[in-house]
Amino acid sequence: MKIIVTGGAGFIGGNFVHHMVNKYPDYEIVNLDLLTYAGNLETLKPVEDRPNYQFVRGDIADRKFVFELFEKERPDMIVNFAAESHVDRSITDPEAFVRTNVMGTTTLLDACREYGIQRYHQVSTDEVYGDLPLDRPDLFFTEETPLHTSSPYSSSKAAADLFVLAYQRTYGLPVTISRCSNNYGPYHFPEKLIPLMISRALADGELPVYGDGANVRDWLHVSDHCGAIDLILHKGRVGEIYNVGGHNERTNLEVVKTILAALDKPESLIRFVKDRPGHDRRYAIDPTKIESELGWKPMYSFDTGIRQTIEWYLANESWWKHIISGEYSRYFEKMYGDRLE
Ligand code: NAD
Ligand code: DAU
């Protein structure tokens, strides 16, 4: 079995490469990644010398490159993680999101049509469903919830999903889609809420909370997401969408306070800043389908997962300090400079 994993130098893709290389020594894992600002080969250090692993640098939206790679590797499966993934960046530069998330996906789908494939798996997101009101805790996203996107990021992901489903119906391509809630865990890029707050708190910096901090996210440890995709690849039904989430809803303020308490830092570091435009209020996944059909169950509660994650950031300072000392520090100035009220 040869699997091309795209975006394997990013947060979730990197964790998935670790998972697959370790669990399936007989599979060949080809990690295709452009190494944008979010891609980091340091994440692959633990597996880079394994005989069943190789890295290829390239752009999923570069048709010539992708077709040549398929010609050479003849993969059995594709798992597409590669994406522009940060909502705030999509608000300042939507075009990059259309190029990678939409055109990159259709380029991969065309290569699958040309060369044949056992499975194309699209790693999508719960953000395609839009948001839920805070005063209706009884509501959850199911696979039947209509697509209703808010940001350029989520719109590009929804567009990609529709192409994936169209290629199944029109060309009979064997596809699956997973739509997961917010991930956290090791190797998470420090522009996203949890690693950003851990790194800022450790430096005794201000913790920028958007709006009133009451927005709710449904947190899942990244290794539980990787386990879900593994199950879908091996047992999932072609043409199906599977929602992935572990019922770990928390307000942003609760998450930030949990991190401060774990690091023994004062809540006075919290700074409420200008809200994200179009900010989704609440995400909450109903995972009944993947649980009942595939027997998936998360291993981590939020309390154990966040503790493990904070310990990982404490033990792996060089991984994230290397990132925030470079180009990323200029990004922080640009994003947050005019946000502070
Ligand atoms: P990430 O930003 O950490 O990583 C993205 C990776 O894709 C990087 O390594 C980057 O170099 C690579 N990449 C970007 N453009 C590329 C291109 N044109 N060609 C090849 N590689 C390219 O993202 P992540 O948080 O790991 O998310 C991975 C996937 O999971 C995304 O598709 C995202 O939409 C989805 N997702 C993320 C979350 C989350 O909470 N982070 C939750 C649900 C779904
Ligand atoms: O739900 C899945 C999605 O989760 C993925 O599809 C996205 O790729 C991923 O980035 C994530 O999107 P969010 O926008 O939910 O994640 P982010 O970490 O950017 O923000 C989480 C919440 O925290 C959100 O309500 C905004 C808030 N926030 C974020 C940052 C970076 C702050 O209050 N302050 C901040 O500085």
Image (cartoon, grey):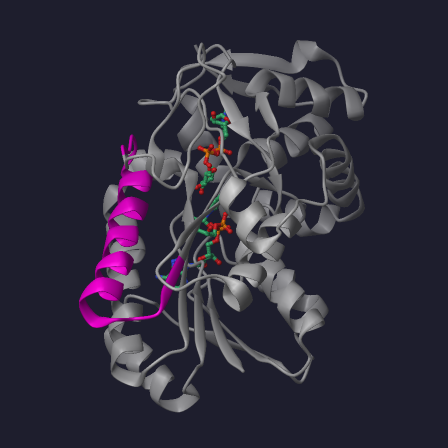
Question: Which residue shows up at 42% across the image and 39% down it?
Answer: 126
Residue 179 pos. (x, y %): 44, 46
Residue 147 pos. (x, y %): 28, 37
Question: Which residue shows up at 53% across the image and 40% down it?
Answer: 288
Question: Which residue shows up at 63% across the image and 82% down it?
Answer: 52
Residue 112 pos. (x, y %): 31, 76
Say whether residue 139 is left or right of residue 205.
Answer: left
| Residue in front for this viewpoint, 312 or 120 | 120
Say whether residue 287 is left or right of residue 93.
Answer: right
Q: Is residue 87 magenta?
A: no
The residue furthest left is: 170
| Residue in front for this viewpoint, 312 or 301 | 301
In this view, 229 is above or below 324: below
Question: Which residue shows up at 66% across the image and 75% down it?
Answer: 24
Q: Is residue 166 magenta?
A: yes
The image quarter in which residue 25 lies: bottom right
| Residue in front for this viewpoint, 229 or 90 | 229
Quadrant where the N terminus lies? bottom right
Stretch of the chain drawn in magenta: 148-176
* Tag count: 0
Q: Main secondary structure of the magenta part?
A: helix
The image quarter in which residue 148 lies: top left
In this view, 233 is above or below 159: below
In this view, 291 is above or below 266: below
Residue 303 pos. (x, y %): 74, 30
Q: Answer whether residue 96 is visible to the viewer in this image.
A: no
Quadrant where the C terminus lies? top left
